[in-house]
Image (spheres, grey):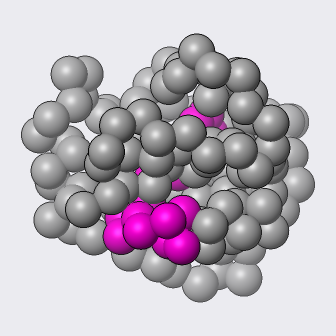
Amino acid sequence: MITGIIVALPEEVSTLTAKKLAKGDVEFLDAQHVLIYSGTGSTNARAAAGKLMDLGATRLISWGCAAGINPALTPGDLMLPLSLLNAAQESLPVDLAWHSHAARHLEVGARFQGCLLESETIVSLSSEKLALFQQTSAQALDMESFA
């Protein structure tokens, strides 16, 4: 079984491989894990997911940093989402068996396991993040995971 890992930013790629990848490049980390540098945004992530599935990936991970919108989150906190919510308020659950497996095998526990919100734009103001948290109860947001 192959797990595909979608990574949006070069800084995030460097946490998984020392190789310098260009957008769209694929790197097999081993026989069961393949990484793709997608670039930012849902369109790029969707294309990357398709490419990984064409290579045989049956599971996908969106790997990288997310903006914390729950005021209790601090930089470096690990979040393992239980669900994804897009900008149109459509919810997508994660595979709970796989989620539990990942949670059991993490060296550092995920303090937050709620909803991850999709954003179509970068949200940098604290007031905007707080408003999104209050509206959705999501813990964090990114631009790729829902794709």
Residue at the image point whose x is 22% and y is 45% from the top: 102
Q: Nearer the viewer, residue 143 or 126?
A: 143
Where is residue 79? Give x, y as percent. 41, 40
- Residue 134 in magenta stretch: no
Report the side of 3 relative to 76 (left or right). left
Report the side of 98 relative to 45 (left or right). left
**Where the N terminus falls, by quadrant?**
bottom left
Asked whether residue 104 appears in the rendered view, the answer is yes
Q: Nearer the viewer, residue 70 or 54?
A: 54
Residue at the image point whose x is 37% and y is 45% from the top: 33
* Magenta extent: 52-66
The image quarter in which residue 27 lies:
top right
Number of disc labels? 0
The image quarter in which residue 20 lies:
top right
Residue at the image point whose x is 80% and y is 44% from the top: 23
**Where the C terminus falls, by quadrant?**
bottom right
Q: Residue furthest top?
A: 18
Residue at the image point whose x is 50% and y is 25% from the top: 16
Q: Nearer the viewer, residue 127 or 23?
A: 23
Report the side of 39 relative to 61 (left or right). right
Q: Nearer the viewer, residue 79 or 101?
A: 101
The image quarter in which residue 15 lies:
top right
Where is residue 83? Give x, y as percent. 42, 67
